[in-house]
Amino acid sequence: MSSMVNQALDDFMARFAAFSKEHCELTSIEFDPDWPSACYQATSNSQSGELVSWQPIVREHVANFEGLNDALEIELHPDIVHFYSRYWSDNIVAEHPSGKLQILQAWNAEDFDRLQQNIVGHILMKRRLRQPETVFIALTDEEDFILSVENQTGAVMLEQVGLQPKEQISADLATFLAEIEPALAD
């Protein structure tokens, strides 16, 4: 399934690249030399605060989730590992038949560390509430609702933070990625 997630994510990123050619504002960002990323399409002359282009970049190595797995004494679902290991990217607005969302990604190694800390906090909250363990992958337009992957099954779920997953959105992450299209932010 993991290679299917990689392929589905590659396909989505290709759709995003094509969409962003028509909507250049999607890939414009203020350059921040203190927040480096391979995503910047900046030159060595780029100045702090200058508007520069960015694009998702395939990572050279699969991200290491061993520390997280050891700390939580779990094995993250392989789809989650591949989803967060494939690209360096800013978050991307997308549309799913169930509504608008923002796909979460890591911008750089420091952002990836923060992501892992947030995943740990989320899973510990789920355990404390005696709920199925999930890992968030997207924000929705509805306040306090997220899309997550159920760690045991790999299903993509709609859940309100702190509550049981409400509804299955897709049977798996690869299917979900095939169902979304890049969109403009509201």
Image (cartoon, rainbow, N blue to C red):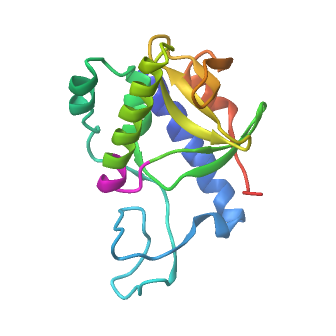
Choose between 68 and 56: the one closer to the eye.
Answer: 68
Residue 1 visible? The answer is: no
Q: Which residues are magenta?
A: 106-112
Residue 118 is situated, as x and y percent measured from the top left of the image, at 40, 40
Residue 109 is situated, as x and y percent measured from the top left of the image, at 30, 53
Residue drawn where x is 21% and y is 32% of the image: 67
Query: On the picture, is 179 further left or further right than 68?
Result: right
Query: On the picture, is 94 further left or further right than 44?
Result: right
Choose between 53 and 98: the one closer to the eye.
Answer: 98
Image quadrant occupied by the N terminus: top left
Choose between 10 and 54: the one closer to the eye.
Answer: 54
Query: On the picture, is 56 further left or further right than 59?
Result: right
- Write down the quadrant of residue 2 in the picture: top left
Residue drawn where x is 33% and y is 83% of the image: 44
- Write down the quadrant of residue 75 in the picture: top left
Image quadrant occupied by the C terminus: bottom right
Compared to 100, does 5 lie above or below? above
Residue 54 visible? The answer is: yes
Residue drawn where x is 45% and y is 77% of the image: 31
Look at the image and say whether residue 109 sits in the magenta stretch.
yes
Look at the image and say whether residue 89 sits in the magenta stretch.
no
Residue 173 is situated, as x and y percent measured from the top left of the image, at 55, 25
Q: Residue furthest front?
A: 128
Choose between 132 and 53: the one closer to the eye.
Answer: 132
Residue drawn where x is 58% and y is 39% of the image: 138
Residue 55 is situated, as x and y percent measured from the top left of the image, at 49, 60
Q: How many marks?
A: 0
